[in-house]
Amino acid sequence: MGRGGATGKQRSLFADHEGFVDKFKPKKTTDDCYTPPKVYEAVASWVAEEYGIDRASMLRPFRPGGDYQAEEYPEGCCVVDNPPFSIISQIVRFYLREGVPFFLFAPALTLFGCAASMGARFLTCDCDIVYENGAIVRTAFVTSLGEHLVRTAPDLTERVMAAVAETQRERKGEPLPKYAYPYELLTSARGSYLSKWGVDFRVPVGEACFVRALDSQKAAGKAVFGGGLLLSERAAAERAAAERAAAERAAA
């Protein structure tokens, strides 16, 4: 090879430079809900008023590619953020152990289970937050602040839902992605719907596989929120019958 030339391997690397660079980009997951700014502002302002926390001392360590355990937490700070719900127990345990004050978004349906035995406090709220990725999640809050183990917060709920409504109004004409999934794809939410209407539906082991996104979603950089099960032809046919039965019961 002459000076300045390139081997076939090197040329291949140069040609695939975009793919090479892409490997180092932060990968989004279904945890990346991205809190609408107005919703975060509603929560942060409430925390500031309720607990006397200086807004300048509030930290948001949960961001794509970040490492909350490696963050600097100066004296007097308070973490007010929306963390990945899938590891929220681990996060709460870390902050309690390190003595870092926090006020975190949390999954409402499993609120007490995430940190009840650790000494955390809980705020039960009726907040169905529409996040930036289109997910609608019933949200509550877990904190180290305050003296009550659990409390309601009607004023916080009101502020958050007003912020959600305002955000939705502003986005009118820019609808969030909503997917009409085929019967071959079963989500946990649809399974819950069938249970709600008393429909017995079962998928045998070996007749489904877990997927994070449909091919059509991958092209748009989207995903099935929480993942889904890709059903066999037989299981999909049974699901279609189950959906019809549920629809009939819902309409009765």
Image (cartoon, helix red, strand yellow):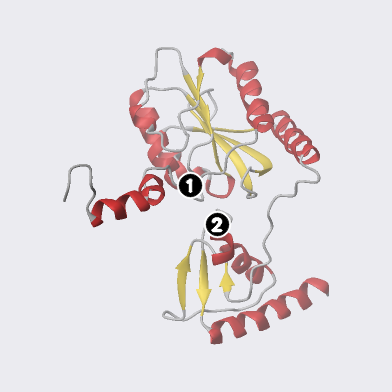
Which residue is painted at 36% across and 52% down in the image?
A: 15
Mark 2 residue type: Ala
Looking at this view, is 112 or 6 the one in front?
Answer: 6
Judge left or right: residue 128 versus residue 187.
right
Mark 2 and mark 1 in contact? Answer it, CB < 8 Å: yes
Q: Which residue is mark 2?
A: 223
Please report the residue visible at 54 percent of the width from the left and 66 percent of the height from the top.
215
Decide: is 100 above or below 27. above
Q: Is residue 53 visible?
A: no
Which residue matches tag 1?
A: 28
First of labels 2, 1 by sequence position: 1
- Where in the figure is residue 56, as x and y percent of width and height? 54, 13
Screen quadrant of the C terminus? bottom right
Q: Residue 70, how many percent across, how many down? A: 33, 28
Q: Position of residue 61 (x, y in %)?
A: 45, 29
Does residue 68 appear anywhere in the picture? yes
In the displayed orientation, state which residue is furthest to the right: 252
